Each structure stands twice: as structure tokens, then as C-alpha cells.
Image: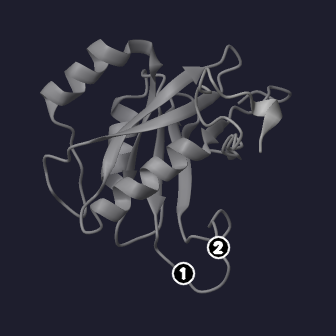
Amino acid sequence: MVMGEAMTKVVLSEQARQAIRADMLQRPHIEACGLLLGEITPAGDWLAEAALPLRNINNSAVRFEFDSLELLECDLTYGERIIGVYHSHPGGPPMPSRTDTGNMERLQDSPWVWLIASFYRQRGAAPGVASDGLSIAAYRHDPQSGLQIIPIFLTPAPPQDHHDAGPASPDHDPTKDP
């Protein structure tokens, strides 16, 4: 990174965060994994709007691999909306393993960001751990500077519109409630 250059970031929607969390809870003993959907801004930020779980063909607690046909189908369906990948570390912190680092380095020409999620608890207060115990960290391998930790910013869930209960009956005038 050049001095004065703005640092890139991941903006993770609450919807995407909850999808990652739900995926991890459904597969607590293996590395849950999937794709991040959204957009990459001209400034290089990743706006992750959704997380799409994919099958871990290794069915392993220490390694994940996507099914190549499932990944191809997603690529054909979502194309440039795929902005990254996520996976969990069921037994450890959200830090890249040697395998993770090697994969990031091998795929460094890809514009994707890598998220690692964990419910792993360490002694003391860990930064980035939400009240539900989920911790997510973002990484990327840069050809010049190596492994980078990318800051994550969460966007709150959109407010629920309790007044929008669907179309009103044509015989009902909402301004004249009994």
C-alpha cells in the first residue's frame, strides 16, 4: 500500500453475516464454506450483500474445497457478483492456516476477498467478536506486500416495515379502521 492511498475494506451486510452464521451452525464440525455476492467498488472495496453456502466436498474440519460443478454453476449464474469466498474454522480462531495462505497466494490475481469465520473463544476480550460469539476476519494476498488483513465494517439490517402487510383489500379503507 502506498502512503496516502485509501485502505480498502469489506462492507458486510447483516444479511450476509447471518447467512454465514446459519451455515456454520448447520455444519458445526466441518469447515462451512461458500461465496460472497455483491460488488467491488471503483475504490476497491468489497460490498458483500449476501453469502451463498456451497458444499465442502472434503467434509473436513480442517480443509474445505468447493464442488467444481457447483462452483461453475454459481459462476454462470452470478458472474461478476461473486466478490469473494468464506469458510469457517470450527476449532480455532479466524486466522489463515498455511493452506489458506497458500490458496490466497496461488489465487492472488483474483479480485476476491477471503473471509474466515469462527466461534472460537480465547481468554480475554477478542476484538471483532460479536455478542453472539461470531468472529469474522477478512484477508487478501497482495503480490507486492503479501498477506493483508482487510478491515470489515458491518451494515445493519434494514428496518422491518411493520405497516406493509401486503396489498389492502379493495373493500377496506385503511383510513377508516373500526
Q: Are marks 1 and 2 in contact (CB under 8 Å)?
A: yes
Residue drawn at point x = 44 percent, y = 48 percent = 19
Which quarter shows the C terminus? top right
Please state which of residues 92 and 158 is positioned toward the viewer in this rendering.
Answer: 158
Query: Disc number at residue 122?
Result: 1
Kindly give the residue lying farthest to the right in the view shown. 4
* Camera-nearest residue between 24 and 177: 177
Secondary structure beneath disc 1? loop
Q: Quadrant of the N terminus?
A: top right
Q: Which mark is residue 77?
A: none
Amino acid at dot 2: Ala
Q: Position of residue 49 (x, y in %)?
A: 55, 32
Crowding near the residue tagged with mark 2, few <14, some 14–19, many ≥20 C-alpha atoms within 10 Å: few
Give the quadrant of residue 29: bottom left
Asked whether residue 74 is in view, the answer is yes
Where does residue 105 sit, x and y in percent of width and height? 39, 35
Residue lying farthest bottom?
123
Q: Is residue 139 shown left or right of residue 60?
A: right
Which residue lies under the disc numbered 2? 126
Residue at 36% across, 29% down: 107
Q: Is residue 148 visible?
A: no
Residue 91 horizontal/vertical position (percent): 35, 72
Q: Nearer the viewer, residue 169 or 31?
A: 169
Q: Amino acid at mark 1?
A: Gln
Q: Position of residue 155 (x, y in %)?
A: 70, 42
Q: In the image, is residue 59 above or below residue 101?
A: below
Between the C-alphas of marks 1 and 2, the distance is 7 Å
Give the residue drawn at x 18%, y 60%: 60
